Image (cartoon, rainbow, N blue to C red):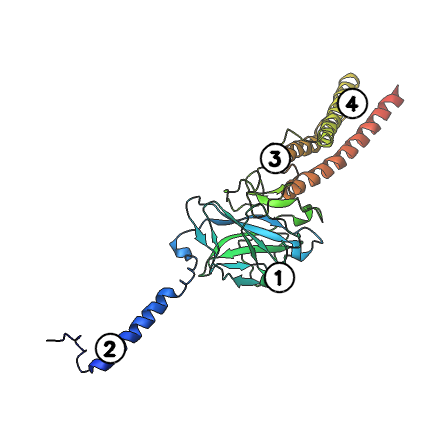
């Protein structure tokens, strides 16, 4: 009877060959049972991952443990792993080490304290994906930034508020100057946040009408940022009264200019009525800016609109005062002549 034996490797005894085969089997079996390593986020060179910051809560005097922000995956059909991505504020940065994945069109809520949810300092949306990042410290409500980097250090998205400081370790020349106004969020009001509107828009501009970010009266930590309800034209009566008052005041100066013009025609004396007509033009300009400001999403004047309208209004008021003084002197001369 012939016994068939396995062929040993050339130059190796059969016993040693069997021992090596057994060892290989053990190693292969262990590798099969070992957990698969977590995949790192793709590098920026593979294309934009379409991850954006979508909502931030860090009002003045807020408890750092109650601050939060969220990231949104704008691609509805792509799951994106968070592992390997780099998060940064103006002062700190960390590399995420997690198995969590943002589903297509999904959100991930980031909190600064591991017990922020259990202590109800942050109340996530239902079934929200939450990730604590205590090593990131906290956010400065006056001036700070949130920056998301790919694993190879390329900026994916960022948002900042206040005036960026070039001395920040993570500062770059693409930060907005100035950024959002975090002081516009009432301290202790957990329902008011800065949010991206609409959630998938990314124009790299801070505010409407051309930008992305607006103040939301309803917070949605870890969920879809609710759209802002369409605001009626000058949505509050105080805004209407302010605009209407400016228009009436401008109209009053126009009437005075017409009276001055008639005095000039009747008495053949220069009353400088043109100055009375042009001096209040700043009132009309200011009113137009106010109407635009309170008609846009967010219903408030931006810093740019304030710097544009307020100085013009002040100069116009000064010219109105000069014009009225000149006309008063001319009118007094004409009346005394009678």
Q: Are marks 4 and 3 in contact (CB under 8 Å)?
A: no
Of labels 2 and 3, earlier in sequence is 2
Q: Which mark is residue 296?
A: 3
| SS at badge 3 | loop
- Label 1 and label 3: CA atoms lie apart by 35 Å
| SS at badge 4 | loop
Q: Are marks 4 and 1 in contact (CB under 8 Å)?
A: no
Q: Residue at x 20, y 80 (%)?
A: 14
Viewport quadrant of the N terminus: bottom left
Q: Is residue 179 visible?
A: no
Residue 53 in the image: x percent, y percent? 54, 49
Above or below residue 284? Residue 29 is below
Q: Residue at x 66, y 57 (%)?
A: 64
Q: Dividing the picture into quarters, in which one does residue 136 lie?
A: bottom right
Of labels 2 and 4, earlier in sequence is 2
Is residue 108 left or right of 319 when viewed as pictured? left
Q: Residues within 10 Å of mark 4 (few under 14, many from 20)?
A: some
Identify the residue position indicated by label 4 in the image. Answer: 269
Of labels 4 and 3, earlier in sequence is 4
Q: Residues within 10 Å of mark 2 (few under 14, many from 20)?
A: some
Q: Which mark is residue 137?
A: 1
Residue projecting furthest to the left: 1
Identify the residue position indicated by label 2 in the image. Answer: 18
Above or below residue 18? Residue 100 is above
Residue 228 in the image: x percent, y percent? 60, 36
């Amino acid at each position: 009877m012939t016994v068939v034996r396995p062929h040993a490797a050339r130059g190796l005894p059969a016993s040693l060959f069997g021992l090596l085969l057994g060892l290989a089997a053990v190693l292969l079996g262990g590798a099969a049972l070992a957990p698969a390593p977590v995949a790192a986020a793709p590098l920026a060179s593979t294309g934009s991952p379409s991850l954006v910051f979508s909502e931030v809560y860090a009002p003045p005097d807020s408890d750092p443990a109650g601050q939060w922000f969220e990231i949104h995956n704008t691609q509805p059909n792509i799951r994106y792993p968070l592992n390997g991505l780099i998060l940064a504020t103006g002062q700190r940065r960390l590399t995420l080490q997690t198995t969590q994945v943002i589903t297509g069109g999904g959100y991930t809520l980031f909190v600064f304290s591991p017990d922020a949810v259990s202590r109800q300092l942050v109340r996530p949306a239902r079934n929200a994906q939450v990730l604590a990042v205590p090593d990131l410290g906290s956010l400065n409500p006056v001036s700070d930034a949130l920056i998301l980097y790919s694993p190879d250090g390329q900026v994916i998205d960022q948002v900042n508020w206040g005036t960026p400081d070039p001395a920040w370790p993570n500062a770059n020349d693409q930060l907005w100057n100035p950024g959002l106004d975090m002081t516009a969020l009432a301290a202790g009001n957990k329902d008011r946040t800065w949010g991206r509107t609409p959630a998938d828009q990314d124009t790299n501009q801070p505010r409407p009408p051309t930008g992305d970010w607006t103040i939301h009266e309803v917070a949605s930590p870890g969920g879809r940022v609710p759209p802002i309800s369409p605001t009626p034209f000058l949505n509050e009566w105080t805004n209407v009264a302010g605009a209407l008052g400016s228009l009436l005041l401008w109209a009053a100066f126009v009437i005075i200019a017409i009276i001055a013009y008639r005095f000039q025609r009747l008495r053949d004396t220069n009353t400088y009525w043109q100055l009375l007509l042009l001096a209040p033009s700043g009132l009309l300009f200011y009113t137009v800016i106010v109407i635009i400001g309170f008609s846009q999403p967010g219903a408030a004047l931006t810093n740019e609109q304030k710097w544009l309208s307020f100085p013009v209004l002040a100069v116009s008021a000064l010219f109105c005062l000069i014009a009225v003084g000149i006309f008063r002197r001319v009118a007094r001369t004409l009346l005394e002549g009678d």
